[in-house]
Image (cartoon, helix red, strand yellow):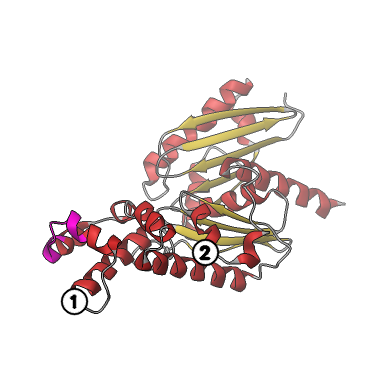
Amino acid sequence: MVSETLFLGVDGGGTSCRGALVLGARRFEARGGAANAIRFDAAMRTVAAVIADLAGQAGLMPHQIASARAHVGLAGVMTPEMSARVAEALPLTDVVVTDDQPTAIAGALGADTGSVAAIGTGSFVGRQSAAGIRVLGGWGLPIGDQGSGARLGRRLLEEVMLAIDGLRAHTELTRAILADHGDSAAEIVFFSSTAGATDLAAFAPRVVAAATAGDAVGALLMREGADYIRACLAALGHRGGEPLCLMGGLGPAYAPWLGAEYEHMIRAPLGSSLDGALALAQRRDQARGEGAS
């Protein structure tokens, strides 16, 4: 018989799925394969296996872990319908399902009011406050992910083509990209016609390095990304005294491009998306307790 409340958090994405179970002072963790909700059946098998692993580590029966206060954050959960479908498929009776953005924000900020700019292959910007968590962006290519590695790569190729047409001045960066494609505009067109987000994001480190070295095109693209982050922060109501976490493979690279007014706000994330999933489960339990008092 388990007398203490169980808290369960799951963080799943296209690469791996992690789970954590808190029972009193003990924390158990487990890891599985990919768990993007778009690949629904495979994701549900992975999450169920992670939950079963946690139950085994804690010495719990399936019906005991089923009653845990749970928050599951999975990539690919984009609608209330998908959230409900995932919740129904999981072996849990008290679960909230979201995408993995709120869990990243809650993990990075802990209980603090503040904002997160998560910039990797894709991007999103979010803010946590007493009113909850609000997220902007994260729509993917071709219609979103401004400032992301994929968008930087796409914009770089655009600038190369504009330089080929004589509408922009070539820089060391654009010449290098053109040379990589055999000095052939056609080769760039062929590449871009099949390039996915990961392919385009592979250019991002070169953009960052070129911008740091003073390349005009590299600097232009980093300023565009920084402008987008600042616009999101303004729309979210970010305030000067609040922390700002720059996350993901590219997030920290934007620190010098945001401007001096943001320098004192930037801090390292307090925790991971898995920590955030657990925190959101625990907050829900706290809210119930406050509502009952």
Is 112 situated above or below 21? below
Residue 38 lies, in percent from the top left, at: 38, 50
Question: Which residue lies at the image location 41% right of the left edge and 58% below the top edge?
Answer: 213
In the image, farthest residue toward the bottom: 167
Is 203 situated above or below 220? above
Is 110 situated above or below 8? below
Specify start and end residues of the magenta stretch as a single range. Answer: 178-187
Question: Which residue lies at the image location 62% right of the left edge and 41% below the top edge?
Answer: 275
Residue 94, can we see it? no
Residue 254 lies, in percent from the top left, at: 51, 59
Mark 2: secondary structure: helix
Q: CA distance from mark 2 to mark 1?
A: 29 Å
Residue labelled with disc 1 = 165
Give the crowd class for mark 2: few <14, some 14-19, many >=20 residues within 10 Å.
some
Q: Amino acid at mark 1?
A: Asp
**In the visual, does 194 lie left or right of 260?**
left
User: What is the quadrant of residue 185 in the picture?
Assistant: bottom left
Label number found at residue 68: none
**In the visual, does 182 lie left or right of 231?**
left
Label number found at residue 257: 2
Q: Is residue 177 magenta?
A: no
